[in-house]
Image (spheres, grey):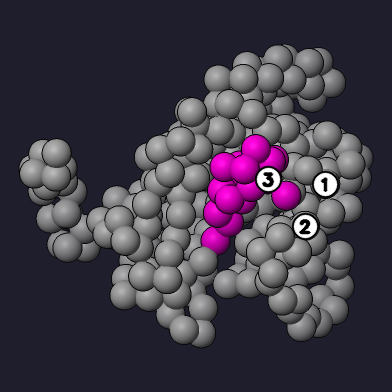
């Protein structure tokens, strides 16, 4: 049964408990950073930072608004990175949870090609050429636990459950939030298993809050993989 997370940014306080919990559960090191004049830290996602609370200070309708966006892999329903790789030993999708999993075999993939295929700019290449990103805490889910980020969220900004339940909860929450924020919206709910609810224009939260439209053409190799995919799948049955 595919699982999903709803991230309601209207009640996120940017406490970064989710960011810390992610590092603790995955035993990821802290990063050495510099003061850039803001509160967001580190500056971006990386091979050792799977989740990052992005912080933007914006003036909207004459009022100051702090916009917080806990960025992470969206666990796409149909992952373009997996399609691009076309190597299930490197990237595969757990049929039970919907988690898109990267293995150490990603080191043999074209990292630039995989990153470019992601409409949310998520995958990151490590010093050993292995690609990494949020794994949905797939091990926790299989053991009856919530993802670490959901577990520690003190405001209830993150909800976890079956995709059917989360979509229903998201729709109900959106209807309520729209009474205060008429421009509120759910971001790509039909295409992702990590669904965000925002109060304002998504572009104000993060560059890739919604799926980016890539202008550059795909490589001949990827095009060939896509053409041959139906035939290859039939041969595997």
Identify the secondary structure beneath mark 3: loop
Q: Label 2 near label 3: C-beta < 8 Å?
A: no
Q: Nearer the viewer, residue 61 or 43?
A: 43
Q: Label 1 near label 2: C-beta < 8 Å?
A: yes
Inspect this view and state whether residue 155 appears: yes
Q: Which mark is residue 21?
A: 2
Q: Is residue 167 magenta?
A: no
Would you say 215 lies left or right of 66 here? left
Residue identifier under label 3: 147
Q: CA distance from mark 3 to mark 1?
A: 9 Å
Rate crowding at label 1 as few (under 14), some (14 to 19) or many (20 or more) other CA atoms within 10 Å.
Answer: some
Question: Can you say whether 163 is above or below 65 in the image?
Answer: above
At x 15% / y 62%, what residue is drawn? 220
Question: Can you say whether 224 is above or below 198 in the image?
Answer: below
Which range is magenta? 133-148
At x 75% / y 71%, what residue is drawn? 42
């Amino acid at each position: 049964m595919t699982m999903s997370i709803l991230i309601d940014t209207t009640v996120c306080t940017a406490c970064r408990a989710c960011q810390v919990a992610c590092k603790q559960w995955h035993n990821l090191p802290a990063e050495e950073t510099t003061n850039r004049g803001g509160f967001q830290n580190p500056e971006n996602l990386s091979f050792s930072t799977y989740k990052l609370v992005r912080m933007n200070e914006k003036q909207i309708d004459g009022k100051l608004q702090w916009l917080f966006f806990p960025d992470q892999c969206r666990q796409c329903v149909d992952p373009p990175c997996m399609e691009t790789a076309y190597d299930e030993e490197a990237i595969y999708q757990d049929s039970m949870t919907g988690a898109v999993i990267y293995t150490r075999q990603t080191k043999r993939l074209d990292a630039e090609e995989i990153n470019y295929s992601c409409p949310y700019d998520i995958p990151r290449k490590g010093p050993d050429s292995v690609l990494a990103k949020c794994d949905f805490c797939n091990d926790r889910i299989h053991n009856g636990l919530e993802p670490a980020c959901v577990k520690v969220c003190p405001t209830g900004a993150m909800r976890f459950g079956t995709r059917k339940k989360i979509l229903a909860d998201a729709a109900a929450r959106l209807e309520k939030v729209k009474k205060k924020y008429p421009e509120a919206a759910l971001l790509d709910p039909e295409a992702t298993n990590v669904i965000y609810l925002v109060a304002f224009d998504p572009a104000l939260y993060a560059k890739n809050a919604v799926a980016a439209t890539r202008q550059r053409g795909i490589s001949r190799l990827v095009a060939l993989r896509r053409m041959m995919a139906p035939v290859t799948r039939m041969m595997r049955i």
